[in-house]
């Protein structure tokens, strides 16, 4: 057996699972990356995965794999970069375990992430939020579930994976009402609930019943909703809401759009970026700065502080000290 197979096994069992305690989502994303890479390498080299060595997965092959992801599989540059990140993580591990392959590893590590144009941040304004929340038919069980789901998403800004994993025991509706969230990197945070959200959740959980370990938002059979199902529900209700709110037809409304909406609501209330980062569970405030760029109020304030176009800027002249004293009396 070549060095690749045991190194890859050790990377998952020792580095990701034991040492880093990576989340199931991270492990699944890395697993899928190497399933795709090994299948591609088999086509390119004619070798079965267990026959491949680290030197077989050299920089030219990795580069060709990344091109294959974009051109043949239709992946976005963002997805391409995520796959490359998983490969780089493995090669950093392999560099310590197999220094004899240092030349190949160094060349792979030198492959850069691809730059791409970031889309304009999409979020809902208050009128669109009102229309979306009114879309579910609350005369039905599914409508009441989806209404509560939308309220929680907009008010807390939770990720769709976090919402899917929310359990009844994670919801606290007494004094200091909040939900306890297990976010990326297994980091826990508590997100405060408003009185409106508390009322909606209290009614829903009374109807939902269930045990503490049961999912808050479930199917009629009691199974937790998948991320896909939640996304479908959001899209469906956005389409319904668009009938009475035409501006929604110009926006692609997804669970992440509702997360952006929550951040922009906080920003509009003057909440600082550091607090918003903590609220959303961001690893770094660099991620959160996109909401400053998207905030039109901040841009309007900046324009108000600038000199109007076509006006010659004046020169600052300090007031006469004596006159300033007399005017202060």
Image: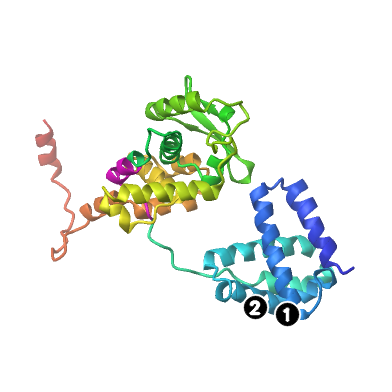
Closest to the observer: 288 or 16? 16
Whether residue 44 is situated above or below residue 82 in the rendered picture: below
Residue 98: tell me if it is visible: no
* Residue 216: percent from left, percent from top: 54, 33
Label 1 or label 2, whichever comes before in sequence order: 1
Q: Considering only vertical position in the picture, is 29 above or below 18?
A: below
- Which is nearer the eye, 277 or 312? 277
Q: Position of residue 19 (x, y in %)?
A: 76, 47
The residue that mark 2 highlights is: 64
Q: Are dots 1 and 2 in contact, CB under 8 Å?
A: yes
Foreground: disc 1 or disc 2: 1
- Indicate the secondary structure of the residue bearing disc 1: helix
Residue at x 47%, y 50% (from the top left corner):
232
Residue 179 is at least partly visible in this image: yes
212 up-or-down from 226: above or below: above
Residue appearing at x 56%, y 29% in the figure: 168
Q: Secondary structure at mark 2?
A: helix
Image quadrant in which the N terminus is located: bottom right
Give the residues in magenta. 122-132
Of residue 38 and residue 297, the one placed in the foreground of this image is 38
For residue 44, which numbered disc appears in the image?
Answer: 1
Judge the density around disc 2: few (<14), some (14-19), many (≥20) Cα neighbours within 10 Å: few
**Quadrant in the rendering for residue 113:** bottom right
- The image shows residue 324 at horizontal and vertical percentages of 13, 40
Q: With 232 as the anchor, is 249 left or right in this view?
A: left
Majority secondary structure in the magenta region: helix
Q: Is residue 48 above or below residue 250?
A: below
For the point 17% across and 49% down, the residue is 318
Measured in 3D between alpha carbons, the distance from the residue under mark 1 to the one under mark 2, in whole angstroms, is 10 Å
Outermost residue to the right: 1
Tell me the number on the disc at residue 239. none
- In which quarter of the view is residue 183 placed? top right
């Amino acid at each position: 057996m070549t060095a690749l197979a045991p190194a890859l096994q050790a990377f998952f069992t020792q580095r990701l699972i034991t040492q880093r305690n990576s989340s199931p989502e991270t492990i699944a994303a890395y697993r899928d990356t190497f399933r795709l890479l090994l299948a591609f390498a088999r086509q390119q080299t004619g070798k079965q995965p267990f026959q491949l060595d680290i030197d077989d997965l050299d920089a030219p092959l990795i580069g060709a794999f990344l091109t294959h992801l974009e051109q043949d599989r239709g992946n976005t540059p963002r997805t391409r970069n995520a796959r490359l990140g998983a490969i780089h993580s493995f090669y950093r591990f392999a560099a310590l375990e197999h220094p004899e392959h240092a030349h190949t590893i160094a060349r792979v590590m030198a492959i850069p992430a691809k730059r791409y144009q970031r889309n304009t941040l999409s979020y809902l304004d208050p009128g669109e939020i009102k229309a979306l929340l009114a879309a579910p038919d609350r005369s039905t069980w599914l409508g009441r579930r989806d209404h509560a789901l939308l309220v929680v998403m907009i008010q807390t800004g939770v990720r769709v994976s976090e919402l899917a994993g929310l359990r009844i025991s994670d919801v606290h509706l007494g004094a200091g009402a909040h939900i306890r969230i297990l976010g990326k990197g297994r980091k826990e945070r508590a997100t405060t609930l408003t009185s409106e959200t508390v009322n909606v959740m209290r009614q829903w959980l009374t109807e939902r019943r269930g045990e503490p370990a049961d999912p808050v938002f479930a199917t009629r059979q009691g199974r937790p909703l998948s991320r896909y199902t939640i996304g479908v529900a959001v899209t469906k209700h956005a389409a319904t809401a668009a009938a009475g709110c035409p501006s929604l037809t110009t926006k692609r409304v997804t669970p992440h759009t509702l997360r952006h909406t929550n951040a922009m609501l906080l920003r509009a209330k003057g909440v600082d970026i550091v607090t918003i980062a903590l609220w959303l569970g961001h690893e770094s405030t660099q991620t959160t700065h996109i909401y400053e760029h998207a905030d039109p109020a901040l841009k309007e304030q900046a324009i108000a502080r600038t000199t109007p176009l076509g006006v010659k800027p004046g020169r600052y002249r300090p007031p006469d000290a004596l006159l300033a004293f007399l005017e202060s009396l």
